[in-house]
Amino acid sequence: MSALSYTDALAYYDCDIDLKHGVRAAVEQEIEAEKKNIQPRDYLPPEHVPFSQEAMAAVEQREADEITEETDRLNRARRDAQLRVGERLTMLQNRWAALVSKNLSLSAANITAHADIDVLNARKLELEAELVRLDANGP
C-alpha cells in the first residue's frame, strides 16, 4: 500500500485504516473524488488582481475609516439624544419645583384658612353666649 503524502483531515484516517482490507483504497478514492469537485482557485482572489500588502493595507484602512465614520455617527446620535433628554429633564425638574412651591403655598393657605375658621368659630361662640345672656336679662 502507498504512503499518503497529504495532510489527513479525517480523524479516523490514521487510526486502524489498514486493519480492514480495502478501507484505505476506498478512503483514498473518496478523497480523490472530493479533490476533483473542489476548485481551490474559487477561494483565492482573481488571478488578474495582484496581491500586495499595499492593496490589503488600503482595504483595511478603508474598513477602518468606515468603522470610524459609523462610530462617529453613533456618537453624534447618542449626544443629540442625551441633549434632548437633558432638556426634557430640566423642563420636568423646573415643573416639579413649581408644583412643589404651589403645593407649599396651598398648604400654607389651608393652614391660615383653618386658623381663621377657628377664630371665627370662637367669635361665633362668644356672640352666641352673649346673645343668650342678653335674652336672659331681657330688654
Image (cartoon, helix red, strand yellow):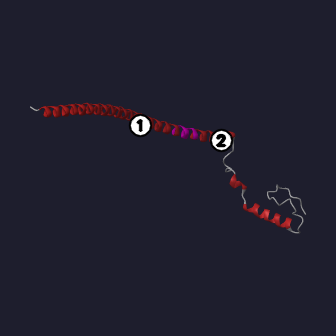
Describe residue 138's horizontal placement relative to residue 10 as left or right. left
Q: Secondary structure at mark 2?
A: helix
Q: Quadrant of residue 137?
A: top left
| Residue bounds of the magenta highlight | 67-73
Classify the position of the N terminus by image quarter.
Answer: bottom right
Of the 4 image quadrants, the one containing the C terminus is: top left
Q: 10 Å neighbourhood of mark 1: few (<14), some, or many (≥20)? A: few
139 or 78: nearer the eye? Answer: 139
Chief SS of the magenta region: helix
Question: The disc labelled 2 sits on which kind of residue?
Answer: Ala
Q: Which mark is residue 55?
A: 2
Residue 55, quarter of the rendered image: top right
Q: What residue did someone put label 1 on?
A: 88
Residue at the location (39% across, 35% down)? 96
Question: Which label sits on residue 63?
Answer: none
Q: CA distance from mark 2 to mark 1?
A: 49 Å
